Amino acid sequence: MPAAATALLRNPLPESAVRTTTTISTLALLATLLLTSAPVAAQEPSPSSRPDSAPATARTADSDAEATAAARRERFRRLRYGNLAELELAGKQLRISYPDLATDSGDYRAFEALEPGQVATWTSARAVKLLTHATLSFGGVVVPYGNVSPDYPGVYSLWPKRTASGWSLVFNGDADIWGSQRDAAADEVEAPLEHSRTDEPTEKLTVEFLEIEPGAVLRIAWGDHQFLAAFEAAP
């Protein structure tokens, strides 16, 4: 046994010295633990520096779902109706659905090349469709309500026609057809159109109602062509 150890056994340390030694050992152990854990703590980002990875709130999720549903409804509406022009006349509803027909297309070039007596047609879209809950009068030319059934609104496809003196609008009894499927045998009414050239051409076919008293004006624009037809609800 070493001499120092033999001397310690023969002359043990006083109690106060033992307590001091224990205290120093305890402090040294705590210091060692703190130094060992410090790098781990330093690697954790502070709350302010952590990326915001929280999920969307319920309100945001509901808003996104509503926007998605609205977009889906709009796509369905456009597939079913195309573009819409709507009007309430004398308490009765009128609606025209019409397709996207671009001026930069073969259909438009064919339209501009129409000869007198020819009716505009197109191969890229459905026909323009009128649904009316009222009998209409275009300057005395009557477009009757209930042409399909007495208890059903008037339903027609609409076709611009080049005439010897200008233009007219043909109302055809076959409403739900393609733009190239007009059957002349189903033509029911032909009303005059006022034609002019506009300085503000449209990029696509546009159909709208302009309200005037006591009736309204149907406006059709395509490229630099503009067509107007005044009408009112017939008795």
Image (spheres, rainbow, N blue to C red):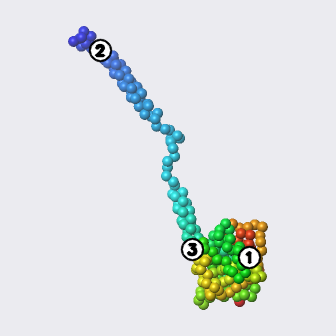
Kind of residue at disc 2: Leu
Q: Which mark is residue 227?
A: 1
Q: CB of mark 1 within 8 Å of CB of mark 3?
A: no
Q: What element carries label 1?
A: strand
Which quarter of the rendering shows the C terminus?
bottom right
Please report whichever mark, 1 or 3, sits nearer to the chain's N-terminal start: 3
Residue 86, quarter of picture? bottom right
Q: In this image, 100 relative to 231: left or right?
A: left
Q: Where is residue 8 in the image (x, y as percent from the top left)?
A: 26, 12
Q: Is mark 3 on a helix, strand or loop?
A: helix
Please report whichever mark, 2 or 1, sits nearer to the chain's N-terminal start: 2
Residue bearing mark 2:
13
The answer to whether residue 124 is above or below residue 136 is above
Residue bearing mark 3:
80
Kind of residue at disc 1: Phe
The answer to whether residue 157 is above or below residue 82 is below
Is the residue marked by circle 3 packed among few (<14), some (14-19), or many (20+) residues within 10 Å?
Answer: few
